[in-house]
Image (cartoon, rainbow, N blue to C red):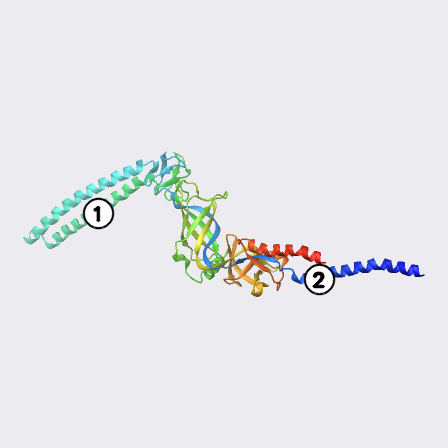
Amino acid sequence: MRRAHLNHFSFSLPILAMTALLAACGGTQQGGMPNMPPPEVTVVTLKPQSVDLRRELPGRVSARLVAEVRPQVSGLVRKMLFTEGGLVKAGQVLYQLDDATYRAAYSSAQADQQRAEAALEAARLAANRGSELVKSKLISAQDNDNLQSTFKQAEAQVAAARASVESNRVNLAYARITSPITGRIGKSAVTEGALVVANQAQPLATVQQLDQVYVDVTQSSGEWLQLRRDLGGSESGKVRRTAAITLEDGQPYAHEGVLQFSDVTVDQNTGSFLLRVLVPNPESLLMPGMYVKATISEGQLASGLLAPQQGITRDPKGNATAMVVGAENKVEVRNVSVSRTVGDQWLVSDGLKAGDRVIVEGLQKIQPGMPVRPAEAGAAPAAAAAPAARGQGAAPSAAGGG
């Protein structure tokens, strides 16, 4: 009985020792938990800065000047005097119509003018003689009045004859159809031998001036109102606004455009209005109808706040929020309003202010109200690494003490 009691005591002694050791080690861990450092997060401190407000808008290229060539007299096309797709000069003859009829009418009008001028000369002499004879009372006053009236009628007939000559000269000139502007001409709608009619609906050809072209884009009225709010209600139209053009294949265009005007009427069907950009086109790379994108500089915001996009999140309802390091380095949640992207950042219109520290990294390991160790983005990591190194050096000592 005594041996059994001793065996039981000797078996329980190691268990008690192990239990005491585990209790001691457990107390060390529980005592160490509150001493763990707060999680480190990367922040960006917001600073007011000048912001160039830009908007990328789709658009179409159109010619700066377009002239549709139409005949002003009727006739058969005798010659076509240009190369389709080539460059033509203002005043260059494009089509020669059969002008025999107009030439004959012009000659006839010239003959009528000569006849009228001869009659005028005879009436003038008779009127002068009548003025002298009436003074001597060799003819009556009535006869003299008739002579003066005939002279006036002869003057009117000469004026009418000269107008007829000019009209027929113009019609004869219209038989030579010329280009109204300098530019590139498209395909011809008629060939030699075709009959054309004065002022017909279908143009014979179209000439377009392409050394400078327009890029017509549309902007929604909502975006325009937001722009005015961003600029504090100032009138951005007083500033020279430029536009960078991106081609249909995504490549940037070499020449910068200038905004010419903004339309004054909003389209009721689309809720947008027209913006027209004038773009140099010396290489004739831009062609009418081509699809491009125009990034328009809409104005300069003197003091704007830009927040990194990774620091702004949205809830299921679409509301934007940001995690900010507030007082005592504790995490705060802010509801923010953003108006547009500027590069890889959001332009903040409400909810944040200058000096706020927005968390951009470490969001997955923090919660509102939790203390954190903020580290400015781009700062040297040495200051943050030193506390971690001291914590690692103390761990062996604690384990040894346990």
Q: Secondary structure at mark 1?
A: helix
In x, y percent, where is residue 61?
44, 46
Q: Which residue is found at the position 58% from the left and 55% from the top?
A: 386
Mark 2 lies on residue: 30
Q: Are marks 2 and 1 in contact (CB under 8 Å)?
A: no
Q: Residue 333 is drawn in which quadrant?
A: bottom right
Considering only order in the chain, which callout, 1 or 2, is on the residue closer to the N terminus?
Answer: 2
Depth check: 334 or 34 in front? 34
Q: Which residue is found at the position 79% from the left and 60% from the top?
A: 19
Side of 309 where 227 appears, left or right: left
- Split into 4 quadrants, where in the image is the C terminus? bottom right
In x, y percent, where is residue 296?
45, 52
Q: Nearer the viewer, mark 2 or mark 1?
A: 2
In x, y percent, where is residue 392?
64, 54
Q: Whole-Å distance between the Cαs marked 2 and 1?
A: 121 Å
Q: Amino acid at mark 2?
A: Gln
Give the total of numbered labels: 2
Q: Reply above or below: 202 against 138.
A: above
Mark 1 lies on residue: 159
Side of 262 where 380 appears, left or right: right
Q: Amino acid at mark 1?
A: Ala
